[in-house]
Image: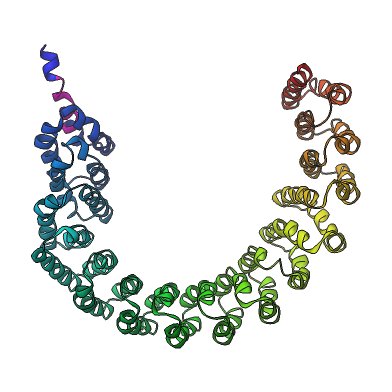
Amino acid sequence: MAAMVEEPLYPIAVLIDELKNDDVQLRINSVRRLSTIARALGEDRTRRELIPFLADGSDDDEEVLLAMAEELGNLVPYVGGVEYAHSLLPPLEALCDVEESAVREKAVASLCKIASVMNERDLVEWFAPVVKRLAAGEWFTARVSVCGLLHIVYPSAPELLRAELRTIYNQLSHDDMPLVRRAAISNLGKFAATIEPAFLKTDIMAVFRDLTQDEQDSVRLLAVEGCAALGRLLQTSDCIACVLPLILNFSQDKSWRVRYMVANQLYELCETVGPECTRVDLVPAYVRLLRDNEAEVRIAAADKVTKFCEIVQPEIAMQSILPCVKELSLDSSQHVRAALASVIMGMAPVLGKDATIEQLLPIFLALLKDEFPDVRLNIISKLDQVIGIDLLSQSLLPAIVELAEDKHWRVRLAIIEYIPLLASQLGVEFFDDKLGALCMHWLGDQVCSIREAAANNLKRLTEEFGTEWACRHIIPQVLEMINNPHYLYRLTILYAISLFAPVVGSEVTCQMMLPVVINAAKDRIPNVKFNVAKILQSFIPIVGSEVVEQSIRPCLVELSEDPDVDVRYFANQALQSCEQAMSM
């Protein structure tokens, strides 16, 4: 009987012991079991004993505190539900004041999670005082944390409390510590989304203007994101009057980091301010960023060139942006050229066929021949966006053929992946004339990944052009290569055969490929022989039972007696498949 009485005390005793243990991992494991322990204690004792104990443990190792901050957000069902959710606030409030930023962020996330299930009365009665205490905290850490909580309380607050919360945000935005001001501007969008329109244009915009002129560039660059957030909340006329001048100033900021952020965000503002302001104000600002002195800014601007062209009219893109694109394709920084190469193909549908062939084609060709392999890779990876244009495909073909023998194997691999798409656009006759020999050449590449990709490429071409074409132009040439003196190349041919068989069907497999595979079973290299066994096993569902019995089974029986253990293993595996097929 005494044991039954003492049993509920055991989990909390274990928790307290392990939380005081010198081993950090034991303390973390204990915290991870908070929900289990709370269930064992019951709702009342969890509120009276467990939560106060945790509130006193905010000076522990940061890994323990991080686990605690996360687990506390999941304990609402174990403290009595929504009615008692406020009992979880004290330990999380303490965690919002610790030095480690990851712990504070997790504590704020848990507070938001708990607040989402609290009713309005409890938010005002219990959550709002937490916000006020954190905002008045002596250490900057508490003030940083509270910036992520204001938007939770504001919608439920009465008028007087709302005014107080706006005042708190104003004070945080003018805090002496740059980290607090950074937190204030980072959470501007969330807080502004809960503010009444009248106060948004007065109180919030006044605070925002001050932050845009902050002496710390780390604050100003976050204010750039705030421009986009506010722009979505304001009406177009207010956005043009209040936000547009700020973003234009930012585009000429003395700090390249701020200009970098503008280059990333500028296209999002175009839809907010409308086409006229985009043409008159934002396009010139974007052109300045494309020609910025700092390579990092040009990279960010180049990365958005297609998105920007999609927003503005094609004529504006041709007149203002295209000359900058030509300059960027010759930029001294290889990273700028790589950024441009990754997006420039997307300009083709925007500008249209004629402008693409006349204006973009020379840029495509220049980038395809760039000395930096990442530039070539980036332009190749987007070939599918322009391959549908017949003339363009033929114009790019010489460069593609040249890249097929590029010294960097990843470039060759990227080209191989686009050959079937190119072939489907150009047709079988053009392919046989220009690309057929190239595809066969890749089967003899020194890099294994290239050889495997080449085999898969031939399979896809067979699917595209048909079995008859493959029997005339591909399969005979592939089978001839089975006599290569190096066993790795012979393995590639066997791999290609295994890919062809399901595509070309039983008749071609039996007549053309099966004899070659059976002959390869006499190879002196064990790796070749056990791959033969695997391929013969894959042939079983394709060919008829008669072929299995007369040709495949005898070969496998011979391989099953091979001196090499791996050859015997795979041969026996294949023989089991034979038995199963024959018994069906």
Vertically, is 182 above or below 100? below
Q: Residue at x 42, y 72 (%)?
A: 268
For this rendering, which residue is in front, 189 or 237? 237
Image x and y of residue 582, in percent: 79, 19
Q: How is the image coloured?
A: rainbow
Q: From the image, which quarter does the N terminus lie in? A: top left
For this rendering, which residue is in front, 391 or 567? 391
Q: Is residue 540 magenta?
A: no
Image x and y of residue 267, in percent: 45, 75
Q: Is residue 267 visible?
A: yes
Task: Indicate left or right for 442 with 104 as reference.
Answer: right
For this rendering, which residue is in front, 5 or 169? 169
Residue lying at the far top of the rendered structure: 1
Vertically, is 209 above or below 36? below
Residue span colored magenta: 7-16
Image x and y of residue 432, in percent: 86, 59
Vertically, is 255 above or below 545? below
Magenta stretch: helix, strand or loop mostly: helix
Q: From the image, which quarter does the C terminus lie in? A: top right
On the image, which quarter does residue 32 sit in? top left
Q: Residue at x 54, y 86 (%)?
A: 320
Task: Indicate left or right for 547 with 248 as reference.
Answer: right
Q: Is residue 57 visible?
A: no
